[in-house]
Image: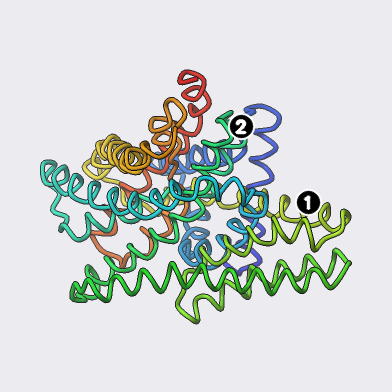
Amino acid sequence: MSLFDIIAVLLTLAALFSFINYRFIKLPSTISLMLIALLMSLGLIVLDQFGFNLSGWAKVLIDSIDFNEALMHGMLSFLLFAGALHVNINDLASQKWVITLLATIGVLISTFLIGFMSWWLLGKLGIDLPLIYCLLFGALISPTDPIAVLGILKTSGVSKSLETKITGESLFNDGIGVVVFLVLSGIAINDQPVDMGSISMLLLQEAAGGIVFGLVLGGLAYVMLKSVDNYKVEILITLAVVTGGYAFADVIHVSGPIAIVIAGLLIGNHGRLMAMSESSREHIDKFWELTDDILNAVLFVLIGLEILALTFTMQYLMAGIFLIPMVLVARFISVSVPVILLRFRREFSPGVVRIMTWGGLRGGISVALALSIPAGTEREIILMATYVVVVFSIMVQGLTLSRVVRELG
C-alpha cells in the first residue's frame, strides 16, 4: 500500500470509530478507539476460521506499516510536545525529586524485577526464553506511556499533586526506558559485552544530553517566538522544534523524547507567558490540541489492529495473562521505593503508591519497542506478552482508575 492509502485508511477508521463511540459507546476516546479496533480485528480472525478470509486487507495494512518507525520516529515527538505544552513547570519543579527517582531508579528496579520474575514464570510454563530477553521485556514494559497516561488522567479526578507526579514520570521515564532497552538489546541481539562504564556513559549522554539539547532548542524557539507576533509563523516554529529537533537529537545521539519534553515545557510556560500574544496562544493551543487528538486516535486504532501481527498460541497467551500481576507487583515495588526514600522529607497523599501503581499505564511505546526486536521465537513470545499487558493496562486500569481514586479518597 502507498503512504497515502495507509493514512487514508487509518484516518477513515479513526473517524468511523470516533463517531460510533460518540453516538453509542461513550467511553474515553483513546480506550474506545482501541477497543473497537481490537474487536474488529478479533472479528476478522474469527470469520477467517469459517472460511470468509476477510482479514487480508487488514494484514496488508499492518504489514505495510513499520509500527516502531511510525511511533518512535514519527508520532511520538508530536504527542510528547503536545502533552508537555500544557504542563505547569512550577508544579513539576515542586515534585522534581519524586519524578526523578521514579523515572530513573524506579525504571531500573522494575526492569530487573520483571525480567527475573518473567524468566522464572516462563520456565515454569515450559517456555525457554533466555534471561537477557526477559530483562529486555522488563525494560520495554517498565516505562509508563505518556500518551496513554495523559489521555486517561484528564477524566480520572486525581489530586493536582498526584496528577503532576504521574504526568511528570510518564513524560521522562520513557526516555530512560528506551536507553535501558537499547543497552540490553545490544547485549541480547548483538552480543555486546557488559561494560558498566560504557553503559553509564550512554545513559548520561542520552539523558543529560537530551536535557541540555532540549534547553537549547526551547531557548532558541523562545527567542524566535518573542521576536514575531504572527500565529502562523509561531505555529511553524513549534513544528520545526518538534520535527527538526527530534531528528537532530538522533543525529547527535541524545534522547529525542527528553529533548522534546524539555522544549515543550519551556515553550508552554515561559514562551506562552512572555513570548506570545493572546491570539497566538489561542491558535497554538487549538492547533496542538487538535494534532494531539488526531494522532492519538490513529495510534490507538493502530494498537487495536496490531493484534493481527501476533503469533497466536495458547501457551504464549497464558504467559501474557500470568505476567500481568507480576508487572503490577514490580510497578508497586518500583513506586514504593522512591516514596519510602522521600517520606522523611515530605508528605504524600493517602493511597499514593496504590494509585500510581494502577495509574502506570503501558501503551504504544512498549508495543513499538517489542516490534523492533528481530524476527524470531523470542520476539513472538515478548510481543504477545507485551500486547496482553498493554491491552489490560489500557482497557482495565484505564477504565477503573477513576473508581480507584474515589475509593482511596
Q: Which color scheme is applied?
A: rainbow
- Quarter of the figure with residue 182: bottom left
Percent from the top left, x then y, of residue 302? 53, 52
Identity, as a three-letter code, of the amino acid under mark 1? Lys
Q: Residue at x 33, y 63 (%)?
A: 181
Asked if 377 appears above or below 21 in the picture, the reply is below
In terms of depth relative to the viewer, which is nearer, 402 or 203?
A: 203
Tell me if label 1 and label 2 are in contact, CB under 8 Å: no
Residue 316 - label: none
User: Residue at the front extreme?
Assistant: 345
- In the rendered image, which residue does mark 1 sit on? 286
Percent from the top left, x then y, of residue 230? 88, 67
Q: Secondary structure at mark 2?
A: loop
User: Residue at the bottom extreme?
Assistant: 251
Cα distance in 3D space between marks 1 and 2: 19 Å
Asked if 82 appears above or below 224 in the picture, the reply is above
